[in-house]
Image (tube, rainbow, N blue to C red):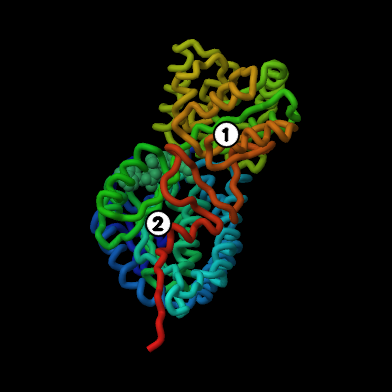
Amino acid sequence: MSDTIVAPVRPAFANFVGGEWAPSTTGRTYEKRNPARPSEVVGEFPASGAEDVERAVAAALGAFPAWSRTPAAGRAAVLLRTAEAIDARVEEIAQDMTREMGKPLREARLEAARAAAILRFAAGEAWRPVGELYQQSATGAPVYTVRRALGVVALITPWNFPAAIPIWKLAPALVYGNTVVIKLAQEAPLTGLHLAECFEQAGLPGGVLNVVIGRGSEVGTPLVRHPDVRAISFTGSVPVGHEVRDEATRLGKRVQLELGGHNPLIVMADAKLERAVEAAYAGAFWSAGQKCTATRRIYVEDAVYEDFRARFLDRIERGKVGDPADPETEVGPIVNERQLDEITEAIEQSRREGATLLAGGERLDEEAYLLAPTVFEGVADDALLSCEEVFGPVTSLYRFSTLDEALERANAVRFGLSASIFTTSLETTQRFVNELEAGLLHVNSQTAGADIHVPFGGIKSSGFGPHEQGRAAIEFYTELVTVYQDGP
Ligand code: NAD
C-alpha cells in the first residue's frame, strides 16, 4: 500500500462529507489493487485522518435536527428512492465489488441486489409503532413510551460484505432519524461509495450521511472517541471489536459489535448426505471462506464419515475456482497478500502439528491471490484450526459417535455466531435448537446466508449488544423514553 501525493479525484474516489465529495484533508491517498490481478489498480482512495472525522461529525451534527424532525415517511421515501438508484446500477456495483475485493461475481450481484431489498424493508419501519400507550396508575392519564433517534451514529464496517453490511447499518440508522458517519473498510471502499452516490441521487439532505475512508487507527479511533458520536455499530474482527467496545463503554457510549465466528456444521447419520455435502462446500468455500458465517468445522457421525468425506472431496474436485469476474466461478481470490500469507501460515502450522491435508493447501496462481479449497482431518480439538478464525477457504473434518459429543465439541469455542445441522430427526433438531451456542441456527441449510427481515447476530465472543437487521435494529438505533402526560 503506498501513500502518494493527492491527484485530482474523481467524485467516486473521495470522501463524502456534508453533501460534498472531497479529497482527504491529509492530502494523502492509497492504492487499492484487484486481488485477482494485483497489477491492476482499482483506484486511489483518500487516506483520511482526524480532521476528516472532525468535519464529518460536525456535518452529521448539523444535519441532525432537520433530519430527525422530518416525518418518518419522508425519510422512508429517500430510502425507497435509494433502493431504486441501487437497482439501476446493481451490475456496476457488483463488477466493482468483484474488482476491489474479489467476491465472485455471482455472489456480488446477489449482494448488490440485496442492498436494495434491505432499504425497502427498513423503509417499511416508518409506518410501524415507535411506542406503547398505557394509563397512569393514579389518574388514568396517558403514560406512553416513545423511541427517539440518538443523534450522530458512527458505523465501522469490514471489507467482506461491502454492500450488505454498510446498508444493513445505514438503513435503520437513517429511517429512525439518526445522522451518520460511516468509515468504510480500506480494502473495499468503492462499493460503499456507489451506495453513497445512490443516497445522494435519491435526494438525501447533505450531512445526513457522511463517508470517510482510511485506516482504523487514523479514522476509526478518532470516530469512536469523538464526544459528539452517541453510538458505534462495528462489524469486524474480535480483537478490534473488543478494543472499540472497551473504548466506547469507557466513554459512556452505546456500542454494538458483530464479530468473527468459528461455525460448526454437524452431519448426522440420518441426514440427506448430498444436501449436506453441497451445504458444506458452499459454507466453507464460497467467497473463499471470507465470511463471518463460513463453515470452519464439519462434524460427521461415524457411520457416514467415509461416505461424506468421499463425496465432499469429489465436490471439491468439481468446484470452479478462479477468476471471480467469470459468473461461473464459485471460489475466487483472497482479499490481499497479507491475508493470503496469514492463511498459508495457518495451513503450514496445521501440517507441522500433524493434521492430514485431504485437499488443497496450495496457491493456484502466480499473480492472483488464489488458494485451493483446503480440507484437513485429524485436527486436534485444541489446535489452531479448531479454535481460531482462519479467514479463508480452509475447513476441517471431525468424526463423532453421539449427538452429545457433537454438541459438546461444536460448543467448545469462544465464538457463537452461526451453526448448522443436517438431520431428518425432529428430536435431534430440537436438541440442536436448544443446546447449540450460536446466534444463528440452520437446520438442513449452510452456516452462511442471512435473510433481510430477521435478526442477525452472534452470542459469546461473536457479538455484543442488540442484534442487527429486521425489527431488532430498532433497539440499537433508538432510545426509549417514557412520557407521563397529564392535562393542563
Ligand atoms: P477488522 O476488524 O480488521 O476491521 C473492521 C473495520 O474496523 C475496518 O473498517 C477497519 O479499518 C476498522 N478498524 C481497524 N482498527 C480499528 C480501530 N482501532 N478502531 C476503530 N476501527 C478500526 O476486520 P476485517 O478484516 O475488515 O473483516 C473481517 C472480520 O470481520 C472477520 O473476523 C469476520 O468474521 C468479521 N465479520 C463479522 C461479521 C458479523 O456480522 N458477525 C460480518 C462480516 C465480517
Check disc 2 and report the residue beneath it.
13
On screen, 310 above or below 129? above
The image position of residue 226, as x and y in percent, is 26, 57
The image position of residue 481, as x and y in percent, is 40, 68
- Give left or right: position of 78 versus 485: right
- Say which residue appears at 49% left-offset and 36% top-offset: 416
Residue 70 seen: yes
- Give left or right: position of 178 versus 127: left
Mark 2 Cα shell of 10 Å, populated few (<14), some (14-19), many (≥20): many
Instruction: Single out the residue that lies furthest toward the front.
Output: 138
* Distance of label 2 from label 1 (alpha carbons): 47 Å
Specify the amino acid type for callout 1. Glu
Mark on residue 156? none
Residue 31 seen: no
On screen, 329 above or below 403? below
Name the residue nearer the viewer: 132 or 244.
132
